[in-house]
Image: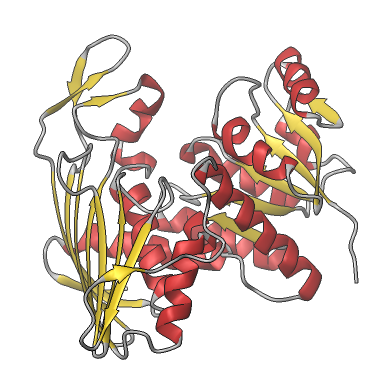
């Protein structure tokens, strides 16, 4: 059984910069299951330049034109989080399937509204939790499912936000507004906890979090201006999973000169260790190690892992699109949906509200 290519419309594509042009477009160009159909930009000349450069069939200058275009099956939203509610809602109202980057909304309320509208319209959705498609995370999930570690007892995570350290690019200044829902807690920490829960095939039941801002200011790269750091650059987290396992994590802003990413899963029969030179899942390459019984810790090959010359960011997005296309063909539910997004928003909301105490998710 075959299917016609899924015709993609991407909102807000610039020919030279942005997440759409650096990750989504290159990923889609390698997938015959999709067709680059329509892109939009507020300036039609920019849209036309981008369309010619990337091989889109059509260029338009408004979201309304794109979501109502007859040659669009799937609308992709990769712009800043504060714009998601309006753009995703417009696409859903037009009856189109939607792929929104994470976070789905600025808060839990907005995410629930988009999920409910998608359900009412009966359209397919996907959320940009790309690490669920990453070969290392999926292999850990397989190993645990096969009993490599026995019963999972606990997991420990150290992570770095990369951003929210000593300096910040002007383009990310909007992440310093807590109400925009794009801070270290909402993005790198959330991606990592989602990947861990997916790998362990278990959801969080209750959480406890302590948030702190240890740097009073952060320096803007372009101007050198020091501006207030108004979001947490330290996250201390504890969680209880439905399986009974306990999770502990510490995330810090910027990058460390020591450990930047360390995810250790301890079980009754074995242990797994996932590390990376960069700060959180989904950004850089991984090294996986493990041991059982009387073994010493040793490297574990990752089937289908990215090669040394492959771009991990593009690769993760590509594999997520592959899951979406496969789901459309088979009727399965492998790709993360807006339901997945709402569950993760609930987790983050519970951490924000916990203030060091325990809260149910």
Residue 234 visible in image: yes
Rendering colour mode: secondary structure
Please tell me which residue lies in front, 309 or 67.
309
Q: Position of residue 208 (x, y in %)?
A: 18, 68
Q: Quadrant of residue 124?
A: bottom right
Q: Position of residue 106 (x, y in %)?
A: 42, 47
Q: Is residue 107 left or right of residue 324?
A: left
* Residue that lies at the very extreme toward the top in this rendered image: 223
Q: Is residue 331 left or right of residue 1?
A: left
Q: Position of residue 335 (x, y in %)?
A: 61, 65
Q: How many numbered marks does the figure carry?
A: 0
Query: In what quadrant of the picture does the N terminus appear?
Result: bottom right
Q: Is residue 118 above or below residue 8?
A: below
Q: Position of residue 172 (x, y in %)?
A: 37, 28
Residue 123 visible in image: no
Query: In what quadrant of the picture does the C terminus appear?
Result: bottom left
Q: Quadrant of residue 13?
A: top right
Q: Is residue 146 above or below residue 114?
A: below
Q: Residue at x 54, y 58 (%)?
A: 113
Q: Is residue 239 left or right of residue 71?
A: left
Please tell me which residue lies in front, 191 or 141.
141
Q: Residue at x 37, y 30 (%)?
A: 174
Please tell me which residue lies in front, 295 or 111.
295
Q: Residue at x 24, y 90 (%)?
A: 268
Q: Quadrant of residue 68?
A: top right
Q: Is residue 217 above or below residue 312?
A: above
């Amino acid at each position: 059984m075959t299917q016609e290519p899924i015709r993609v419309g991407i909102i807000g594509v610039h020919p030279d910069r942005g997440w759409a042009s650096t990750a989504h477009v290159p990923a889609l160009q390698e997938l015959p299951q999709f067709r680059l159909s329509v892109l939009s930009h507020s300036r039609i000349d920019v849209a036309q330049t981008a369309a010619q450069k990337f091989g889109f069939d059509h260029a338009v200058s408004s979201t309304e034109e794109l979501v109502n275009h007859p040659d669009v099956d799937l609308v992709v939203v990769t712009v800043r989080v504060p714009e998601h509610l309006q753009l995703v809602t417009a696409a859903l109202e037009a009856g189109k399937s939607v792929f929104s980057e994470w976070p789905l909304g600025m808060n839990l309320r907005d995410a629930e509204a988009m999920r409910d509208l998608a359900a009412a319209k009966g359209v397919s959705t996907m959320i940009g939790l790309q690490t669920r498609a990453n070969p290392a995370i999926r292999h850990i999930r397989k190993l645990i499912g096969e009993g490599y570690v026995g019963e999972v007892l606990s997991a420990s995570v150290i992570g770095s936000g990369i951003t929210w350290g000593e300096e910040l690019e002007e383009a990310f200044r909007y992440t310093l507004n807590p109400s925009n829902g794009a801070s270290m807690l909402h993005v790198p920490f959330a991606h990592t906890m989602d990947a861990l829960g997916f790998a362990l095939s278990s959801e969080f039941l209750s959480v406890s979090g302590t948030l702190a801002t240890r740097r009073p200011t952060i320096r803007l790269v372009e101007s050198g201006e020091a501006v207030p750091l108004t979001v947490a650059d330290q996250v201390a987290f504890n969680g209880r999973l439905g399986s009974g396992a306990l999770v502990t994590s510490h995330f810090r802003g910027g990058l460390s000169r020591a450990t930047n990413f360390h995810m250790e899963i301890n079980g009754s029969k074995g242990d797994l260790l996932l590390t990376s030179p960069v700060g959180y899942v989904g950004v850089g390459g991984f090294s996986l190690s493990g041991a059982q019984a009387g073994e010493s810790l040793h490297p574990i090959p990752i089937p289908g892992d990215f090669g040394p010359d492959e771009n991990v960011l593009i690769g993760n997005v590509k594999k997520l699109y592959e899951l979406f296309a496969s789901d459309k063909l088979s009727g399965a539910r492998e790709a993360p949906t807006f339901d997945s997004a709402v569950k993760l928003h609930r987790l983050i909301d519970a951490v924000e509200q916990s203030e060091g105490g325990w809260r149910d998710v």
